[in-house]
Amino acid sequence: MVHAFIDTNIFVRVATQGRPGCEQNHFTDLRTLVEEGVFRLLVPEVVSLEVEKTFRSLSKSVESACDSLCDAVGKAAQNTWSEIDSLKVEVLNRIREFKKSKAEECCGVSSKISEFLQSDAVTRITLSPEIMVAAKRRHIAGMMPNCRKSSDQDALIIESLVSFFTGHSAPDTAFLFCSENTSDFALEVKDENLDKRYVLDPSIQVALPPARFSTDLASMLRIIQGYEELPAPTNEEIEHAVNMRDLHDVEDEEFQVFDQIVMDAVHRESTKQFQEDVLPSVPEDVRMVRDRLSSQVAALLAECRNCTSWGERSEYKLPQWIEYVDEPMIPYTSLPKLLRIKNSLEKYLEVHRQMDGDGIVGDS
């Protein structure tokens, strides 16, 4: 199982959508992974308290920021040419519209996040006297990066995680650590391409399982991405297949044959790309989950097709039950989508079993 920690600032980003990397679809994927038991989300009580404190005033903070922006625009436009006053009015109206819609949106999203963090799907770590004492010791000993400026809450978060892993021996587990606060938790390292990258600071890492540090949900969830996120494959085999298909008129009966040849070539190249560019960086825990889910999906499809009620209409409707993923590419789709396909096929199989019980043959 993959263990994950997500800092308060990331949940705030999800609620405000202030920067790329924490969009709603990433939170939806995270929730799917946690609720299906693939990820174990560790939520220290201090994070829950910080989240609720921030969320209570989040809408007002958004409104206040928009009001400040309106004031700034008004002052900046005082000495502008009168002939473009209509532009100033348009900008101010746009800010006011944004203020209302964004405040309402933040309120709705923050409620969903709070509900999720209080659900049984997550693993909450209660703030205990032992954790508080350990955090104070960590601060005094200078076992936090930027220790003079880091807050007590940062040390409480680390000692909460240490407390969990001490009681749940899992030294080889994949551990994901997601926070914008790089100065409080991380160390910047340069890779061979000189791209900016962070790792958990050694003073923290020594007490925890090997961690992957990310500054947003998109980066953290890269280990569960599917072939869909890869660049479209291009090679000579696909180009040749496309040229052969395009030589035939759309009405030609052979068109479908050549079209399938093209799709088979695309699938082969996409699979190759996924296996070479994605899988090597995926933790073994995640690979095992992929293999298990792929086998379950294949078995469910076989069971569906063995039902007497299965027919041509069933095949025609199948894409909507597998999220319109081409069947050969199901093992290489994103992990959340693979989970949803498995759950969907379980329901579809139950539909056909009920139809079999009613004596319906090849009609769905």
Image (cartoon, helix red, strand yellow):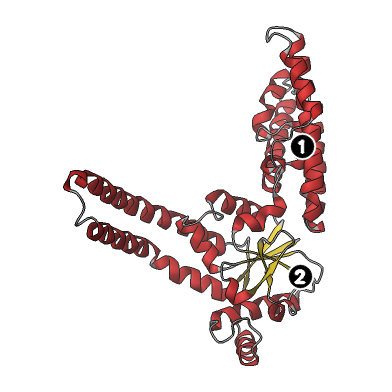
Distance (Cα) linking label 2 and label 1: 31 Å
Give the residue pinned by disc 2: 210
Residue 204 place in picture, x, y as percent: 69, 79
Vertical arrangement, residue 74 with respect to residue 202, above or below: above
Residue that lies at the very extreme toward the left in this rendered image:
82
Q: Would you identify the image quadrant in which residue 286 lies?
A: bottom right
The amino acid type found where label 1 is placed reads Ser
Residue 296 visible here: no
346 lies left or right of 268 = left
Vertical arrangement, residue 19 with respect to residue 152, above or below: above
Q: Nearer the viewer, residue 307 or 59?
A: 59
Residue 4 place in picture, x, y as percent: 67, 64
Q: Find residue 240 and name its label.
A: none
Give the residue pinned by disc 1: 270
Residue 223 place in picture, x, y as percent: 72, 54
Q: Would you identify the image quadrant in which residue 163 lies?
A: bottom right
The amino acid type found where label 2 is placed reads Pro
Q: Nearer the viewer, residue 63 or 290?
A: 63
Residue 338 place in picture, x, y as percent: 71, 43
Q: Nearer the viewer, residue 355 or 363?
A: 363
Instruction: Please tell me which residue is depicted at 74% across the width and 11% down the height of the picture.
Output: 247
- Choose the circle earlier in sequence order: 2 or 1: 2
Which corner quadrant holds the C terminus?
top right
Circle 1: element type = helix
Circle 2: element type = loop
